Amino acid sequence: MLKFFEDRGGVMAVMSERADGSMRIYADGKNDKNRQAFFSKCGIEKGEVFSVEIVHGACAKTVDKSAPHLIEGADALVTKDKIFLSVTVADCIPVYFYVKNSEIIALAHAGWRGILGGIIENTLEEIFKLGGKNTDIEVVLGPGLRACHFEIKDDILGQFEKYSQHIIRREEKIYVDLFAIIREKLISGGVLETNVSESGECTFCDREKFYSFRRDKPMETEAMVAIIGLKK
């Protein structure tokens, strides 16, 4: 289990590993046993966890404890309630937000489409609507597909035109640093550069620790779960 914000007493932020089993949500509940075991390992009741549907978009929604436990049409959640927010990832980047002094948390599932579409900006907007101050926002970028393995083809290169400084050409291949783009967006949105940190781990590189959709190309996606919650 990976842990973040460990020096912050009021929040718990974690991510499962491959050894915990696949955490992807299926309608038939095939991974419910794995999810429940991991929640229990974290000391979390199943009913306290609110998850996004994941549509690889840019929608961020503010939720409270009265919301349905599966939030449709969203890739990021924001709350002031003492509940747990979760997203599943298997190369996309889990972005954890903690707003000190305001008891606001957020969690975004950031794939390249969502990043370009505004998932980071939209999550910040929801935080600001709840009264969060930009100087109080702390962010951790969890493991994901780093620039060493996020290769793109010419057909989508134009979509990254605004971020040419984060494009790397190596051995006639094109790679993009999504983490750098997220950092740029966070800082442009008012987050202090010193308040943004990264786990530094690449899901593609570490086969033993992480599922990776791009590396494994599975028939059915297997994924880790990222969770953040305010402690009671």
Image (cartoon, rainbow, N blue to C red):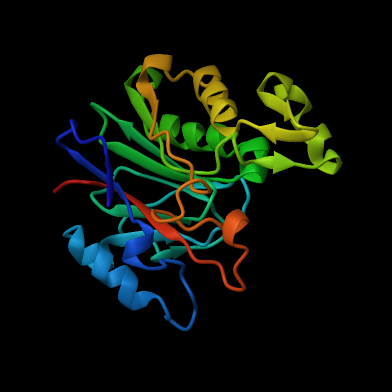
Please identify the quarter of the rendering in which residue 13 is found: top left
Q: Single out the residue that lies furthest toward the bottom.
A: 28
**Residue 152 x %, y %:** 74, 41
**Residue 106 x %, y %:** 39, 41
Q: Residue at x 56, y 32 (%)?
A: 121
Left or right, 178 with respect to 186, comes to: right
**Residue 52 x %, y %:** 47, 58
Please identify the quarter of the rendering in which residue 201 is found: top left
Please identify the quarter of the rendering in which residue 78 is found: top left
> Is 21 placed above or below 131 here?
below
Front position in the image: 143 or 163? 143
Q: Residue at x 32, y 34 (%)?
A: 98
Is residue 25 something that shows in the picture?
A: yes
Left or right, 39 with respect to 202, comes to: left
Q: Residue at x 39, y 57 (%)?
A: 225
> Is 207 placed above or below 140 here?
below
